[in-house]
Image: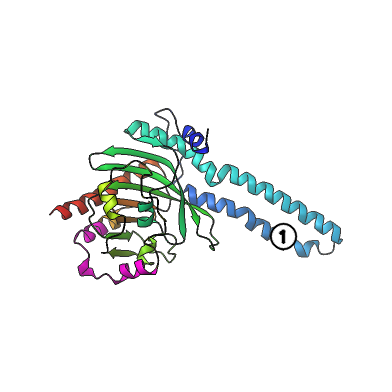
Amino acid sequence: MNRDSREHRRGTAAPGQGHGDVPRFPWLWSQGAVLLVPVLTLVALVGLAPVLAPLPRLAQLAIFTVIIVVAVLAFLTVQRHWGGTARLHRLAPVRAAWAAQHGWETAPNGAPDQDEVALALPRGWRADRAMLRLWREGPAGQSRIETWKLRAVPGSTRGTAYREVVSVPARTGPGRFAVTNRATIDPLLGPPAWVDGAREGWDAARTADDGHRQENSSGAVGGGAAGNPEEGYGAEAGARAAGASAESAPDWTRRVRDLVMAHQDTLLTVAVGAGRVVVCALDDPRPETAERRLALADAVAAAVGGEAEA
């Protein structure tokens, strides 16, 4: 049995299991908990250095060695109980139970849809895996709830991160639009890479995969084009987003902006394009929050599709 099958089997649970024990910010807490041990270890080593100075060199080395060994064991313990993998294992039965109650299907972990990655992922990251995956087929196509496991691009000092993602089909037409609900000084947190750090962006150019996506917007989970997640990123795409005039953007962008700004949530970006509406949030994997994000995505899809047909 491969790793995805084992993880998928762990993600099943009997209907009715509660989810009151799911914290609002598990990914931020797990990152903080893992960083806490090295920080405290460094503080201890620096603080003890003058205190241990009068002792013989051998005694100092012995004490520092004990501190480092204890720190390593503490780090492994924290990682096991409060790290990202531990959080995923706790969230899997919660999400599966919610799916069973609401008519959704679970799916094994796998590669995320690359069109959605290019549409919504912030700069400096690559989407390693889509986890805790749920999907539901509707008249317009497939809706999805996923947790993306991100890894920093080579050369970055950042480690692993997670993003909560919901996506729904939409009649987007050519072009793409993205808006982040809050301003952030860190472009690695919110806006997609193609908006080049701006809080909002419209790119009127038709992307290479839009035609494929419009014809296959109801494809199976993970059925996106197997391309480079960085396609569409970089200076050229950012220049198109930054250089697009307000007159070039369709009327529905104002309605989408209003919907996103009225939505109460953690930091998130709503991206529209390639036949999808993707909500990419910094944290909060609770099922009730996913429901609210799905409602937001559906409202955006309705606004986009309604004006496209008008």
> In this figure, which colouring scheme has been used for the structure?
rainbow
The magenta segment is 235-258
How many numbered marks have been drawn onto this rendered protein structure? 1
User: Residue sitting at 59 percent across and 46 percent down?
Assistant: 79
Residue identifier under label 1: 45
Query: Per the image, is 248 magenta?
Result: yes
Residue at 64% over, 56% down: 38
Would you place residue 155 above or below residue 283 in this image? below
Q: Quadrant of residue 185?
A: bottom left
Extreme residue toward the left, this view = 310
Q: Left or right of 200: which side holds 70?
A: right
Residue 106, given in percent of the width and then of the height, sits at: 39, 35
Whether residue 51 appears in this view of the structure is: yes
Q: Amino acid at mark 1?
A: Leu
**Picture residue at 56% right of the left edge, 45% below the top:** 82
The relative height of residue 251 versus residue 71 in the rendered view (above or below) is below
Q: Is residue 234 magenta?
A: no
Question: For the stretch drawn in magenta, what is the main secondary structure?
Answer: helix
Give the percent coordinates (x, y) of residue 139.
22, 39
Residue toward you, 146 or 182:
146
Q: In the image shown, does 81 or 116 lie closer to the viewer?
A: 116
Vertical placement of 303 versus 145: above or below?
Answer: below
**Residue 268 visible, this orientation:** no
Relative image position of residue 49 (x, y in whole percent): 76, 63
Q: Is residue 292 left or right of residue 14?
A: left
Query: Crowdedness of circle 1 by 10 Å Cα count: few (<14), some, many (20+)?
Result: some
Q: Residue at x 36, y 44 (%)?
A: 223
Task: Name the quarter where the C terminus is drawn.
Answer: bottom left
Secondary structure found at label 1 = helix
